[in-house]
Each structure stands twice: as C-alpha cells, then as structure tokens.
Amino acid sequence: MGKPKLREHIINREWCKGCGICVHFCPKQVLELDREDKAFAARPEDCVCCKLCELRCPDLAIELELEEEETSEALETAEA
C-alpha cells in the first residue's frame, strides 16, 4: 500500500473558531488563518496527509478526504 494522497481539506467554517491549533501542528505549513480567523489550506500541494490538523482540532472542523489507490471492489476482483 502506497502513501495516501490528498483529495481535499474539508473545513467547516461554521465550526472553526480560529484557535490556530491546526496551523501550529501542521508540519508542512499547509494551513493558515484567513482575515476572518478561519482555517484554510493555503498550500494543499504540500500536504503529507499526517492528519495532525484533523486529530488536533478541538471542534472537529477539519477532515482530510484522501484518494483511494485501489477500491476494495478492485481488490476483490484481483483476488478472485
């Protein structure tokens, strides 16, 4: 199984209170706070999918959507 690949950062702006925890913990400085103190992915191409932002967000406002390399259906077909 290869390295996970990011599809997108899903950030619920209504839940984000702008605490900056996700920004602080991101090892690649992907996230920033905008003018309204809401988190956004400023450099999504640098994301390594560590999910620290998702795990550390106290308000559960961030979710990483990852691309699946192979679907379970394709794996079942290959095994048959």
Image (cartoon, grey):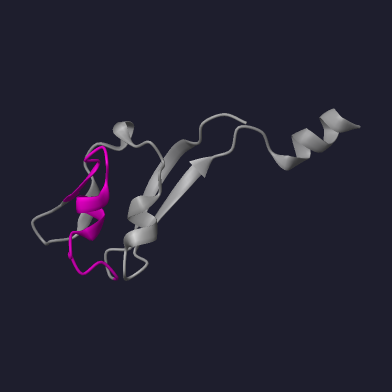
| Residue under the point 47% across and 48% down | 65
Quarter of the figure with residue 53? bottom left
- Residue 66: image location, x then y, percent: 49, 43
Q: Position of residue 60 (x, y in %)?
A: 37, 67
Is residue 43 positioned above or below 59 on the image? above
Asked whether the viewer can see residue 32, the reply is yes
Say whether residue 33 is left or right of residue 69.
Answer: left
The reply to whether the magenta stretch includes residue 29 is yes
Q: Check the picture and name the quadrant holding the C terminus.
A: top right
Q: Identify the residue at image location x=27%, y=41%.
A: 27
Residue under the point 38% across and 56% down: 54
39 in relation to 41, above or below: below
Q: Using the rendered view, name the quadrant where residue 71 is placed.
A: top right
Q: Position of residue 78 (x, y in %)?
A: 83, 28
Which span of residues is magenta-colored?
15-32
- The verdict on residue 35 being magenta is no
Query: Is residue 1 left or right of 23 when viewed as pictured?
Result: right
- Which percent across, then down, holds residue 31? 23, 46
Left or right of 25? Residue 33 is left
Name the residue at the left extreme: 35
Residue 62, visible in the rendered structure: no
